[in-house]
Amino acid sequence: MAVPSEARGAGGGKGLARPARGGSPPTQIRVRMAPSPTGFVHLGSARTALFDYLFARRQAGVFVLRVEDTDEARNQPHFETAIYEGLHWLGLRWEEGPDVGGAYGPYRQSERMDLYREAAASLLKAGAAYRCYCTKEELDAEREAARAAGRPYKYSRRCLTNPPVGRDQFTVRFQVPAGEVRWDDLVRGEVVFDLDTIGDFIVMRADATPLYNFSVAVDDARMEISHVFRGEEHISNTPAQLLILEALGHPRPTYAHLPVIVGQDRQKLSKRKHPETRLALYQELGYLPEAMVNYLALLGWNAGTEQEIFTLAELEEVFDIARVQRSSAMFDWQKLDWLNGHYIRQLSAEELAARLAPFLPELQPDVVRRAVPALQERLRRLADARELLEYLWTDPAAPDLEVADRDKVRAALAGLDGVAWEPEPIQAALDALREREGWSRNALFKPVRRAVTGRDISPPIHDTLALLPREEAFRRLSRVL
Ligand code: GLU
């Protein structure tokens, strides 16, 4: 890759001393996740974090969390908190970050401004960047002229060749060399970019704040990041970041651009169109973090075997970034539900009760515990328990039953008289009644269910009844008669 000759061996700027250009790559595995706290946590960010975490675990490396909060207008502290909460919910942890500290801090970009300014000064000194005094209006006019002429826009380099005099407001522009940039992407293989398509780009604004590609490259270098995993949408940023790293004399990290996640409509998951983009949704609906981790791992990766069920600990053993696919990963609710059902059924009754409790604040812990056997086999998501058990904390209106159904309820009342108020005796009493009268399950259970819950769907009828206090069950049955 061609670099302006003055830039060779640069990197002597204050605080930026590093081995000469192309110096030996970092020996320690250090990966980073670099979220911007400008909105809710994205499903794709959670996947990136998981892959970072697994790669670091597998290679005895370090996982760094770096908060990219330079967009003052859009950053919110609660979005940063949401990142920690979302990743902790998944069971991920990191060795370095704003919340845990570390030797390469600070870990918020807003606290690293001096480093970007130093790096920009060093690029200017080395001749790899230059001051651009063009005003917004002048640049808009250039862009407009390119558009009118039907050619892609590239900065004219006016300030490199013939800078206007008497101006003091400037941005710092990187001087893009001729040639091409290539890298071996762990997912996409060799990627080649023709530098002719990239105009000289701004690295520092006039207010001395860095642009995204600049702060990322400076931080990846300063934090000695060995591997950068991120979404495919960043692939077009990589050439600029590689140019900056090279001009500063830093070794390159290895890149892996992860495939996009698409919805069932085959469109890239977008905050606006796809509710499944928001990580917190899964917590709200009652997906278990175990299921979510398993599912995220399969979004673009497979073990190369038939195995699809993996705990986090198992993934730490088998995850291989080289097995990440290039083609997009399709989000599939059915598969997620299947995994969630699997993990729900794996829980002990005690554990499931504890996980259900936050979804059922209306119920006493012992009621939740008694409901578990009726729920464990049928729950898709923990929050589904609300609909199934709502009749326990509401008083559903008495349904208007037909005469034949009222007769069944009357018979059930008689059959349940004196029966111990537990699922098994209730079941035995109702079955005996059905057999005696020659009624199908549905014929008897449906009106009984509607009488006590007001609905057609509930846990098995004997559980449904036993979860209510006996007097309350009898009251609801009697009132439809
Ligand atoms: N702050 C960027 C983002 O949230 C980071 C991209 C990267 O990992 O380089 O998309």
Image (spheres, rainbow, N blue to C red):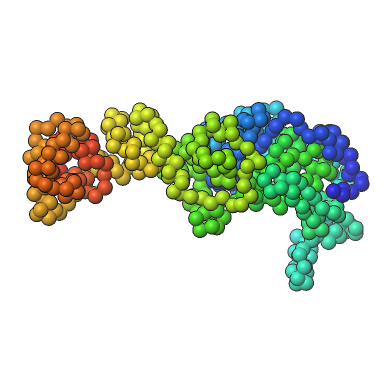
Image quarter of residue 75: top right
Q: Residue at x 36, y 38 (%)?
A: 359
Q: Position of residue 410 (x, y in %)?
A: 8, 45
In depth, the one of 100 and 151 nearer the eye is 151
Q: Residue at x 14, y 30 (%)?
A: 420
* Outermost front residue: 305
Residue 35 seen in the current view: no
* Outermost right residue: 5
Q: Residue at x 59, y 34 (%)?
A: 318
Q: Position of residue 188 (x, y in %)?
A: 69, 48
Q: Position of residue 52 (x, y in %)?
A: 62, 37
Q: Is residue 16 left or right of residue 440?
A: right
Q: Position of residue 321 (x, y in %)?
A: 64, 40
**Would you place residue 174 above or below residue 283 in this image?**
below
Q: Residue at x 67, y 35 (%)?
A: 31
In depth, the one of 38 and 377 nearer the eye is 377
Residue 332 seen in the current view: yes
In depth, the one of 81 and 397 nearer the eye is 397
Q: Is residue 4 left or right of residue 285?
A: right
